[in-house]
Amino acid sequence: MFALLIAIIYLSFISLGLPDSLLGAAWPVMRIQFDAPLSFAGIISMIICGGTIVSSLLSDRLTKKFGTGLVTATSVTMTAAALFLFSISTQYWMLVIFAIPYGLGAGGVDASLNNYVALHLKARHMSWLHCMWGVGAAVSPYIMSFALTGGSGWQQGYFIVAVIQISLSAAIFISLPLWKKCAKKEGAASDEQVKSQPVKFKEIFKIKGAVACFICFFCYCALEQTTMLWASSFMISHNGITAEDAAKFASLFFIGITVGRAINGFLTLNFSDKTLIRSGQALILLGIVFVFIPDISTLTIAGFIIIGLGCAPVYPCIIHMTPSLFGEDKSQAMIGVQMASAYLGSCLAPPVYGLVANHISPELLPVYLVIFLALMVTMHEAVVKRTKK
């Protein structure tokens, strides 16, 4: 029965990644129908991001009151409903409104599931689950492409993903009894540890090492999302390659993260979370050095792949070590704010670099990334030091 629950959690992580790439894949067609500027996709994206931040911050209270299973099922249902409403939208303002439950549902799933896995499963599952998120995020553009090339329109792409999400939410609701019978053979926390009172928001920041941990998350996601968004533009400017080739090669960064997390799951059997995080940070630095070298396209491409491989262990390993660093009774509150910090970094850092690229030079990307890396390394070491018993 426990194996069935793990399978459902894996499917939940795939579903978490499915909606993340839809807007970017569909917007070139959607904006023509809505007669909207190219930049208006950013408004929808920021609303979704805002919703994820709010639901992440509320995750501790909601999860301790209703349980991870119910919060996850409800959140997936909310996201599915929002995707369906996207599929029948006929005006841009409708997308703006429906983006609110879209974000609220995504944040609820992310924070609750990450804490559940950190408490109840081994480190290898955390890495493989985040690899499944990458699978979902990689598959959704193909679903949208299938809908567009088949003549059904972008609406059909959103509808297909909505149906997948609805099916998953039904499976999670049916499986709710399993969430309460989590087997202790995988290292589950006791009921007394998990069912504690929610931590007040102002008290979270008083926890030793908490602020440094949140800054670490902010910096990681700032680095990751900036690289994802601007790798193509950098290669066009830095290496003089075509836009088509740049788009193709930039996707290798994303593949690097996904493959890296699959490999990282096996590495957790022999290495600690701290060791894997430090190794990942070292790989990121090596990749940035490769990207910084001018006029050699092969090194630039290799650099982005190495950055992706380096990013792979950082996010899942920090989440997995949260209960051991800050206590199992505080882990949901901590992970909720960690997710909010991550979304904040994802939301703010890429457009700031866009301003830098526009007004100074797009070739400053390696410098921009190394600043976030240096701060991330500093904050991670501060967390380790301040939480050391």
Image (cartoon, helix red, strand yellow):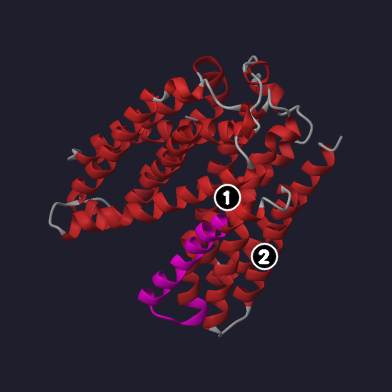
Residue at x 67%, y 59% (from the top left corner): 280
Is residue 192 or residue 56 the one in the foreground? 192
The picture quadrant where one finds residue 281 is bottom right
Q: Does residue 177 appear to the left or right of 158 in the view shown?
A: right
Direction from residue 277 to residue 221 in the image, left or right: left
The residue where tag 2 is placed is: 283
Q: Let me know if residue 243 is in the magenta part.
A: yes
Q: Which residues are magenta?
A: 237-262
Q: Position of residue 148 (x, y in %)?
A: 19, 57
Q: Secondary structure at mark 1?
A: helix
Classed neighbour count for the residue bearing mark 1: other residues with Cα under 10 Å, few (<14), some (14–19), many (≥20)? many
Query: At x 46% / y 49%, what residue is drawn?
Result: 132
Question: In the depicted view, which residue is nearer to us: 343 or 187?
Answer: 187
Q: Position of residue 40 (x, y in %)?
A: 33, 49
- Magenta: predominant secondary structure element? helix
Count the marks. Answer: 2
Q: Is residue 59 above or below residue 43?
A: above
Quadrant into which the C terminus falls: top right
**Does residue 153 sit above or below 254 in this rendering?**
above
Going by the image, does 378 lie left or right of 90?
A: right
Q: Could you tell me the amino acid type at mark 2?
A: Leu
Q: Is residue 46 magenta?
A: no
Q: Label 2's element?
A: helix
Residue at 42% from the left image edge and 74% from the top image edge: 246
* Residue 221 badge: 1
Query: Going from the N terminus, do you reach mark 2 or mark 1 first?
Result: 1
* Residue 330 in sight in this render: yes
Check disc 1 and give the amino acid type: Cys
Is residue 358 among what the camera can see? no
